[in-house]
Image: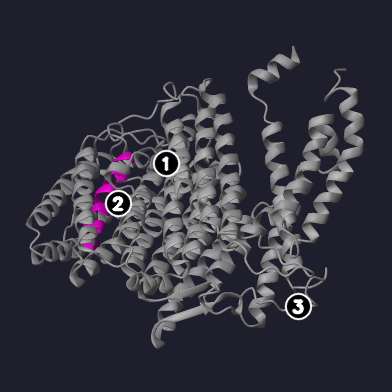
Amino acid sequence: MKERGMSLIVKRITKITVSLIFLFGVYILLHGHLTPGGGFAGGVIIALSFIHLVLAFGKESALRRLSEAAVSVIESCGGLMFWGIALLGFMGGYFFLNVLPKGRPFDLFSSGIIMLCNIAIFLKVGAGLFSIFIALAIFRMPSEDKREND
Amino acid sequence: MLPIFIIVPLACAFLIPVISKIRRDFAPLFANLCGITLLFFSLNSISWLKGGLKVYYLGGWRPPFGICMVLDGLTVLMLLVVNLIGCLSLIYSIGYIKRYTAPQLYYTLFSLLLAGLNGVVISGDLFNLFVFLEITSIASYALVAFGTEAEELEAAFKYLVLGSVASTIILLGIGILLGNVSTLNMADISRSINLSTSGNLISYALALFTMGFGLKIALVPFHAWLPDAHPAAPAPMSAMLSGVVIKTIGVYALIRLVFNVIGFKPVVSLIFIWLGIISMSIGVLLAIGQWDFKRLLAYHSISQIGYVIFAIGLGTPLGISGGLLHLFNHSLFKSLLFLNAGSVEYATGTRDLGKLGGLTKEMPVTSNTCLVASLSIAGIPPLCGFWSKLIIIIAAFQAHNTAGGTACIFVALITLASFLRCRNMPLSAGLKRPSLA
Amino acid sequence: MSLYFLCLVLFSLGIWCLLIKKNLIKKIVGLGITEYAINLFFILLGYRVDGEAPILDKYNPITNFVDPLPQALILTSIVIGLGITALMVAITIRLYEKYRTFDINEIHRLRG
């Protein structure tokens, strides 16, 4: 059976760095209201950790952990969560009103709905970017399929 | 109550991928519910206007710090256009989209398109308008490429490149305006421009907006994408593109920027009048030699939008009302014509006018509605196209613009000739008989 | 002032690349250059002389910072650019599958 993915050195290093990249992405995501970054940057970094897996090991390894259907559902849930947060404000008065308690400034759990919005954006952006990459990577042209079967 | 126009289609667009995994039939049901709800609310919005202008502050933040949504008379007209044609196209696509392999993707993209169109119309903030314009554009690029045949992909690529360049030019114009007045609220910008003296930069921004939105409207130097993109899209999407999208992200946004934000100058009037006359003439002259049904309709779109831009460029109250009435009428009869073309293509498998003929007995509804729409676009009384063209011609002669008025009459006669050929060939009885697929 | 002019030069370079190059992939790169030039122009609009990064800190209060509003607008614009690039690449891959070439002069079935 053909050896999929890249060489042995890349695979060993990937096993260490994937979790570090994921952790860094979560840090940037959660501190979005204090430091630059937030939902979009955090989502891109977390999607990059999955793409790192795909590049080093081949697409089956990442698709085993997170199938395409699951990615699509996560993406829709991210969008629905953002829509739900905005609707919460709509019931409270104005669309997107900041209804949760705002703690002291510079705390981690301050500024009301912004952290929840960041998490919703991360779900949508991360899942969306990963599904774009998978869709482009698993696209097989008819001539390539014939060549593999020979 | 204004954000309801964005809440409903966005909910639909996010729910459909999840729900269609449970049952495939739920996607059309949801989308049509969304369309009917939007139509109901847009008919209600006429009564919301009773107390005057309505402003809604997003998040409770007062302008100029916050984003706001505004409802005034032009907004109500555009909401009616968008939601009426959107709802009817969704009902049409229940049967039409079954031919394609992924109907739930179509409904998701269509709901995003509706959300973007409604957002453009009710936005009161310049960058919010740009963001919704981009949502609409990206959804329409993907919908034009929906069939993924060779010609559809080529048309979609052309449309994508030209549309992205247009959006970039519009963003450059917004940037220059922002650098000048440092606020993004449209009412605030217009107040600051009246007080400021830097006329040159504002004129440059206006030139950039004319170029960018002219590409979206498909005025004549910028029209190269339209004859390829409209035939290639699925029929309900062609109806939306030609009947709604061009008008909302092009004509409506241009009217807002030129009349409400920057102020109507005589040089702008001259540019619009000449762009309108050139679009009218070249559109209809190119349409005469067409043998593809949908391509012919696409060229006629260019010509009729030329009428609207010409009338708005006149600047008189009669001219502007004639232009807006023609906008409303054109969205009605042009989307009807595109839906008819879609029916004919669905039934016979071809769009070539030379091969069609003799369909009146088999498709009576399509034939009669096509007759009504063709007479309306040609300007036969008492149908609606006649009244709006009459008002535009009278306004042109009242503003002492005889060149424009003569061009309008001439173009109307050529449109009539072109649609007589279009009416006789596919839908008369007794000519060739194609095989009904 | 010359920095704004350089941004417009970059914008024109992107449009030139979009017009002249025949390969589809190079056209995608040209459109990307155009979009990033506009993003740079926006960020330059927010520059204030002797300004610092607009990040509030608990211990060192700063008073003179650059305008953060264009930076927030550009985040949105970058995401839009990402979406358009992804769509363009997907359409290009499918175009290669149908037409078997990336040359824009060969992909010319729609005429008239």
For residue B110, say whether it is visible.
no
Tell me which secondary structure the magenta stretch mostly adopts.
Answer: helix
Image height of B156 relative to B412, above or below? above
Disc 1 to disc 3, how far (Cα)? 44 Å
- Label 1 residue SS: helix
Which residue is painted at 63% across and 83% down in the image?
A: A93
Query: Which numbered marker is on residue A100?
Result: 3
What amino acid is labelled 1 in the image? Leu
Residue A145: give x, y in percent of width and height.
70, 20
- Label 2 residue SS: helix
Q: How many marks?
A: 3
Query: Which numbered marker is on residue B162?
Result: 1
Which residue is painted at 75% across and 16% down in the image?
A: A149
According to the image, label 2 marks what residue?
B370
What amino acid is labelled 2 in the image? Cys
Q: Per the image, is B307 magenta?
A: yes
